[in-house]
Structure formats: C-alpha cells, structure tokens
Amino acid sequence: MYTHELLGREKAEQLLREAARYRLARQAREAAREAARAAAGRRVTAADQDEGRRHARRAGRLIRRPRAAG
C-alpha cells in the first residue's frame, strides 16, 4: 500500500471518528434538554406546596414537608 493511500485512509478514519463524536455530543445535548423539560413539568413551586398544606391543615390533616428527593 502506498503512502498516499495510507494517508487517505487515516484521514477518512479521523473524519469518521470526529463525526461519531459530534453525533454523540448532539445526542447527549438532546437527552439533557429532554430531561430538563420533563423536570420543569414536574416541578412544584414552594408557593404551590404551601397552598396545599394550608388547605390540608384547614381540613384537619397536616402534611409534613417531604424529604428532598435525591
């Protein structure tokens, strides 16, 4: 195999490696964005929690503050 063939092959392999790396990075970014969107949908503000606790106390059942989910 000639030198220029070797160089071409190395260049092609390098391009393939870079393409794979960029694809992985993009997938990771998209997954992180999806996770953030899901978390935002589940997030309950402190005001909402206090509101619920006040109604519960009025109904006679006091809700203890749940431990922070790790």
Image (spheres, rainbow, N blue to C red):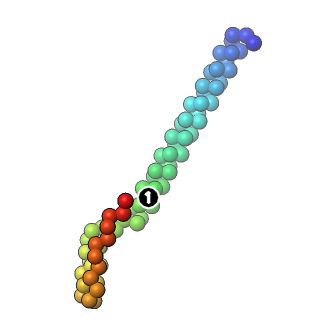
Q: Quadrant of residue 23?
A: top right
Residue that numbered label 1 is attached to: 37
As helix, strand or loop, the secondary structure at mark 1 comes to helix
Q: Residue 30 vs residue 61: left or right?
A: right
Residue ID at (46%, 56%): 35
Question: The C terminus is located in which quarter?
Answer: bottom left
Q: Quadrant of residue 50?
A: bottom left
Question: The N terminus is located in which quarter?
Answer: top right
Seen in the picture, residue 63 relative to 28 is either above or below; the reply is below
Graded by Cα atoms within 10 Å as few (under 14), some (14 to 19) or many (20 or more), the crowding at tag 1 reads few
Q: Residue 40 vs residue 50: left or right?
A: right
Seen in the picture, residue 63 relative to 23 is either above or below; the reply is below
Q: Which residue is at the far bottom?
A: 59
| Residue 2 spot, x, y in % from top left | 73, 10
Q: Which residue is at the far top?
A: 3
The answer to whether one can see residue 6 in this image is yes
Residue ID at (25%, 84%): 57
| Residue 60 spot, x, y in % from top left | 26, 89
Residue ID at (64%, 20%): 10
The answer to whether one can see residue 55 in this image is no
**How many dots with numbers?**
1
Q: Residue 26 vs residue 58: left or right?
A: right
Q: Amino acid under label 1? A: Arg
Seen in the picture, residue 51 relative to 24 is either above or below; the reply is below
Q: Quadrant of residue 45?
A: bottom left
| Residue 67 spot, x, y in % from top left | 32, 67
